[in-house]
Image (tube, rainbow, N blue to C red):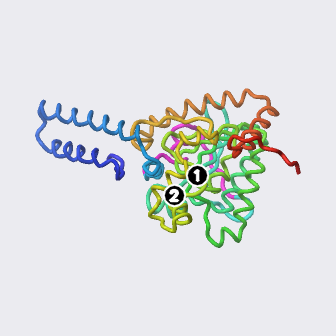
Amino acid sequence: MPPELLEFEEPIAVLLKEIEALGMLPATGPRDAEIASLRRRIESIRADLYRNLQPWQRVLVARHSSRPSTLDYVEMLFTGFTELHGDRRFADDHAIVTGFAWFHDQPVLVVGHQKGSDTKQKIYRNFGYARPEGYRKALRTMRLAEKFNRPVFVFVDTPAAYPGIESEERGVAEAIALNLREMVVLDVPVIVVVSGEGGSGGALGIAIGDRVLMQEFAIYSVIPPEGCAAILWRDSGKKVEAAEALKLTAPDLLKMGIIDEIVPEPAGGAHTAPDEAARLLDAALARTLAEVGALAPDVRLNRRYEKFRNMGRLGTDFVDQGG
């Protein structure tokens, strides 16, 4: 069954209906040839559409329900995955998964947000909205990886950290802030992939690394477009304008130096061909790990620090006041 089509893919929907109608007819040479021709047109139209996506359209792609999740990539890219649970303080947050695995015969730690695919899973995973214990679990397992000298792979895909009262009561801001501080000095290679929706501090709380990669149609921003529109225009219907203003696309973020590399996706997005998306990501991760792993620890840590320290200079010299 093909993935659900998005609102801007209406031309493809029309052709798919034609193919469905032809498929109900007796098999003949001309019928098969026409179906093949329609499929080629679909691929051509899809390539054109995705070559010229607007920011809001990229938001829709990044949020697609069939887009590969952290556990999907774990299955396709890693072997011997053993999940680790709990923050050793309060509970196990199902919106963040962590576990040791093997990547190209090298032991690594995998950390990532998990939204869930169907309704039952989405409720179980809290729709990817991590609570404080999720960030504390992530840091606990990262420190364990540091102890055993295992590189860390992080997959970012969340609308934001969970904003509920119980989340605030248990110190979500402190948990995220602690992760930011500790991940900067984590003495193993850390490679971050923005694989879907990177939203607000909920994303940044596990997104400090030596290299930040971003899949072609993922998004990464300080706030979701709907929230931005509600604050700036008092109208969440202005989400299209907000998406444009936020500069949340991979090309925008690469230009500003927020990310280090864009990982290509199949035409039509990762949800149309997960295996191909995983193959492209696998090559980028293997190359990046080799590059980062070849650096001396002190060089790697200094470069990681400078990378995030340099963000926000906006073309002016930053004067360090000390302290």
Q: What amino acid does circle 1 point to?
A: Ser
Residue 28: where, in percent of width, then height? 11, 33
In the depicted structure, whether residue 18 falls above or below residue 266: below
Q: Are marks 1 and 2 in contact (CB under 8 Å)?
A: yes
Query: Which range of residues does the magenta coloring cover?
Result: 66-86
In the depicted structure, whether residue 287 falls above or below residue 66: above
Q: Residue at x 62, y 49 (%)?
A: 83
Let me know if residue 81 is in the magenta part. Answer: yes
Residue 23: where, in percent of width, then height? 17, 42
Q: Residues within 10 Å of mark 2 (few under 14, many from 20)?
A: many
Can I make out residue 46 in this image?
Answer: yes
Location of residue 94 (image quadrant): bottom right
Q: Secondary structure at mark 1?
A: strand
Question: What residue did someone put label 1 on?
Answer: 221
Question: What residue did someone put label 2 on?
Answer: 225
Q: Residues within 10 Å of mark 1 (few under 14, many from 20)?
A: many
Determine the residue located farthest toward the front in the rendered image: 316
CA gap, disc 1 and disc 2: 9 Å
Can I make out residue 71 in this image?
Answer: no
